[in-house]
Image (cartoon, grey):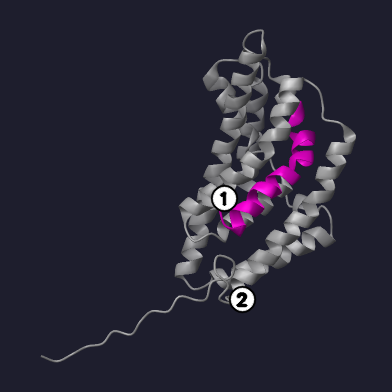
Amino acid sequence: MNAWFVTAVLLGAASSAHCIGMCGPIALAVPSPAPGWRARAGSTLILNGGRIFTYALIGLTFGTLGQGLRFAGLQQGVSIVAGTVLLLSVIVPGLLERWSPTGTLSIWIGRGRGLLARNLRRTAPEALFLTGALNGLLPCGLVYAAAIGAAAMDSAEQGALFMAVFGLGTWPALIALRMSGSMIGHPVRALLRRSSPILISAMAVLLILRGLELGIPMVSPAAATVPAQISACH
């Protein structure tokens, strides 16, 4: 696993404090399909699996965008700009959260929220998966940060994997939350919250280094060169 995916999983873990605040109430509101820890554990895995499925789709979308930018020769510049934006989001807390979707996207998000609210009390496996998938669509600054990282990947598949790994990083806290049925203590949440800016900064530096093409393997690879074609007369 290279530096990017280590950063993704650590960013997911550090974002757990934010996830507990946003996704925690949803996780606690969804009832268990049957008494006992086995039923609760199964429903918890399905619920979080749906959320990671959505993250992977987001990563696939942004990874495709990044791949297109790379083919157009623009990805390096975009990578530097994206890293700078992430650094600014650390210096100016809440910068990413200030962006809110508008227009058609805002309408679809509103519909998704309505469907999520109507689906919360259903406990069938497909309903739990849908609840988790819709939960993953809720606007979140740290998901935006991870999506920027996905756009820096070399392919759509790597973008999807990056976001999936980010989602897996949030699992320990959210699974513990749902299994215990209570919010995680303030000291742990405070530790996670303090870690988040550090890891966002690390990902920002990686993005900037990637754009600079310094020839550092797996971190800042040199620009690909196209060998000149040699023609010969026969």
* C-alpha gap between disc 2 and disc 1: 21 Å
Q: Main secondary structure of the magenta part?
A: helix
- Give the mark, 2 or 1, whose residue is nearer the N terminus: 1
Instruction: Determine which residue is flagged by label 2.
Output: 212
Q: Residue furthest left?
A: 234
Residue 16 position in % (x across, y down): 75, 40
Instruction: Determine which residue is flagged by label 1.
Output: 162
Residue 55 position in % (x across, y down): 58, 42
Observer-nearest residue: 27 or 106? 27
The three-letter code of the residue at mark 1 reads Phe
Residue 152 among those drawn in magenta: no
* CB within 8 Å, label 2 to label 1: no
SS for dot 2: helix
Question: Which quadrant holds the C terminus?
Answer: bottom left
Q: Which residues are magenta?
A: 1-26
Task: Work out whether 167 lies above or below 35.
Answer: below
Residue 113, numbered label: none
